[in-house]
């Protein structure tokens, strides 16, 4: 059956149930049909339509029964039924939505003989947070794995993977209940040598007009100074620093050194465990910048080829060669004592599983400390939005195969998965996953995805998230994405941030 549409049997149904049906059907790329009266439709169904009926019984526990009517190719009417009950402690509204989605996933997988969602009905960006909450309550890992499969419909492999990742992160997380004064600091540099077609980050080509760059740096340096004062005022301690973007190494050697020097002066102290500077694009790195990283106590960097296939680099808007990546990798190894992460993306246009296998083989020969494997996401706001059809993108099943090949090679390199997140519009509903050799895990990546440590964001589009350890509630504020707004309205953003931090951390209080 192609291009199936669905009808809802009861148009007066609760809005959250209607949305739950739409969300679950969207996993199969099935859209709602124009509204029609239910009972009348059952006999009129065609082979490219299904009719969905949900019945909720709200007693001691909630029971949701979902029926799906469909027309077989031989003209007879078929019906599949699935019924599930809530767990005793579940809140009733969210339970109904969850059960409707799960019922539809089960029924449509059965009807169409395929399951498009290895992550079941989980849609959140940070699935590890669910496991951390269960670990807080003393759950054992086998019970968590079981629950992820029954309650959210995860494939056994994904349930095992995400549980292992969350358990690996557990020792690095701040303890529940007591407000820790350890924080992380993020500094965003929104420039890149050129824009990759799939990129939706707020990143700009370096301004030709030097005065605009100078205005940006002045604002950024003021942002750093204000953060340092805020940290002192509230007696906070910096555990990790992450300079990302964009591509921080897009700045020239003098600007880059000045930036690192200021960061070192204000944030490198006895509590610091990690200082990462992304050097994502090989066409932005020089030996001088590598030596600056070493001089200012950077501990970790990231060179992000995304692929080692020249045809793909050309296609996605990179202006460097595969050999540039190799050269820069060895220049970093030879000139600085840094842990090196490398990022790749599976599902890039025109690539085959053999291309991905070759990419990871070439990276294995370089022997980086970390390998981050992203799955291509078709994000709105990227350069190729609206023209995806022109790019020859691999099928979801092929991308799943590529991911499996890359993961297997990372494991052969002695790495283990240690952080994981998901995004909207990912090919095949898959995941992004960070691998590290034991002892080289990026703490910042763990903290940002776990959302249990306060992170102060500096620079355009940076988020500050203050986390209350009593409840794990997060209060956030965001700097302007737009470069000029960030520069002109910086005082307003600094004031918002100060207020946010002051609410959670009384000034000068000792741990
Ligand atoms: S290097 Fe990264 S931030 Fe810059 S354009 Fe490419 S994907 Fe975007």
Image (cartoon, rainbow, N blue to C red):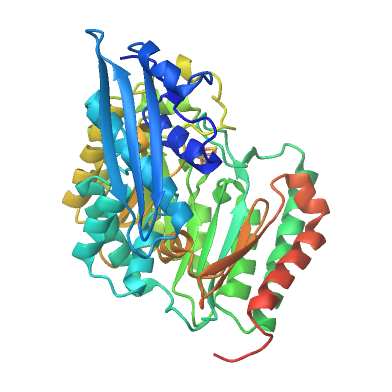
Q: Is residue 147 visible?
A: yes
Residue 45 left/right relative to 260? left
Quadrant where the N terminus sits is: top left
Furthest residue to the left?
A: 412
Q: Is residue 431 visible?
A: no
Figure check: 507 above or below 254 = below
Q: Nearer the viewer, residue 393 or 132?
A: 132
Figure check: 424 above or below 490 = above
Residue drawn 26% across the image and 62% down it:
144
Quadrant where the C terminus sits is: bottom right
- The percent coordinates of residue 443 (x first, y second) are 41, 66
Residue drawn 52% across the image and 32% down it:
196
- The percent coordinates of residue 337 (x first, y second) are 38, 64
Residue 408 left/right relative to 38? left
- The percent coordinates of residue 400 (x first, y second) are 27, 34
Figure check: 437 above or below 96 = below
The answer to which quarter of the image holds residue 321 is top left
């Amino acid at each position: 059956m192609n291009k199936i549409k669905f009808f809802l049997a009861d148009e007066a149904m609760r809005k959250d149930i209607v949305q739950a049906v739409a969300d679950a059907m969207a996993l199969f790329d099935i859209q709602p049909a124009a509204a029609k009266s239910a009972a009348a439709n059952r006999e009129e169904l065609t082979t490219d339509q299904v009719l969905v009926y949900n019945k909720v019984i709200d007693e001691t526990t909630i029971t949701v029964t979902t029926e799906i009517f469909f027309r077989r190719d031989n003209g007879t009417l078929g019906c599949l039924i699935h019924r599930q009950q809530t767990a005793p402690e579940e809140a009733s509204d969210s339970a109904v939505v969850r059960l409707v989605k799960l019922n539809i996933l089960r029924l449509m997988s059965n009807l169409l003989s395929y399951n498009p969602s290895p992550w079941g009905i989980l849609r959140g960006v940070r699935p590890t947070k669910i496991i951390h909450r269960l670990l807080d309550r003393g759950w054992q890992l086998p019970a968590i794995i079981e629950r992820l499969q029954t309650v959210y419909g995860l494939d056994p492999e994904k349930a095992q993977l995400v549980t292992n990742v969350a358990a690996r992160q557990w020792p690095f997380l701040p303890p529940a209940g007591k407000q820790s004064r350890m924080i992380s600091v993020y500094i965003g540099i929104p420039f890149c040598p050129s824009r990759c077609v799939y990129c939706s980050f707020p990143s700009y080509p370096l301004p030709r007009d030097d005065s605009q760059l100078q205005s940006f740096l002045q604002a950024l340096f003021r942002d750093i100074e204000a953060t340092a004062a805020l940290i002192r005022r509230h007696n906070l301690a910096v555990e990790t620093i992450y300079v990302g973007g964009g591509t921080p190494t897009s700045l020239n050697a003098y600007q880059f050194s000045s930036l690192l020097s200021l960061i070192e002066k204000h944030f490198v102290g006895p509590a610091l465990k990690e200082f990462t500077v992304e050097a994502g694009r090989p066409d932005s790195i020089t030996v001088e910048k590598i030596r600056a990283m070493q001089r200012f106590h950077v501990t970790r960097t990231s060179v992000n080829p995304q692929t080692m296939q020249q045809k793909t680099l050309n296609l996605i808007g990179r202006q460097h060669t595969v050999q540039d990546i190799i050269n820069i990798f060895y220049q970093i190894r030879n000139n600085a004592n840094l842990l090196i992460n490398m990022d790749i993306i599976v599902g890039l246009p025109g690539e085959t599983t053999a291309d991905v296998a070759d990419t990871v083989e070439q990276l294995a020969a370089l022997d980086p400390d970390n390998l981050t494997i992203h799955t291509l996401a078709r994000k709105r706001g990227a350069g190729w939005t609206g023209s995806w059809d022109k790019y020859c993108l691999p099928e979801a099943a092929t991308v799943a195969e590529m991911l499996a090949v890359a993961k297997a090679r990372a494991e052969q390199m002695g790495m283990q998965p240690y952080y994981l997140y998901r995004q909207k519009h990912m090919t095949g509903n898959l995941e992004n996953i960070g691998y590290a050799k034991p002892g080289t895990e990026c703490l910042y990546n763990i903290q940002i995805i776990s959302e249990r440590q306060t992170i102060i964001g500096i620079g355009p589009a940076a988020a500050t998230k203050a986390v209350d350890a009593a409840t794990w509630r997060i209060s956030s504020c965001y700097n302007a994405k737009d470069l000029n707004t960030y520069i002109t309205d910086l005082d307003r953003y600094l004031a918002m941030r100060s207020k946010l931090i002051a609410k959670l951390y009384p000034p000068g209080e000792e741990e």
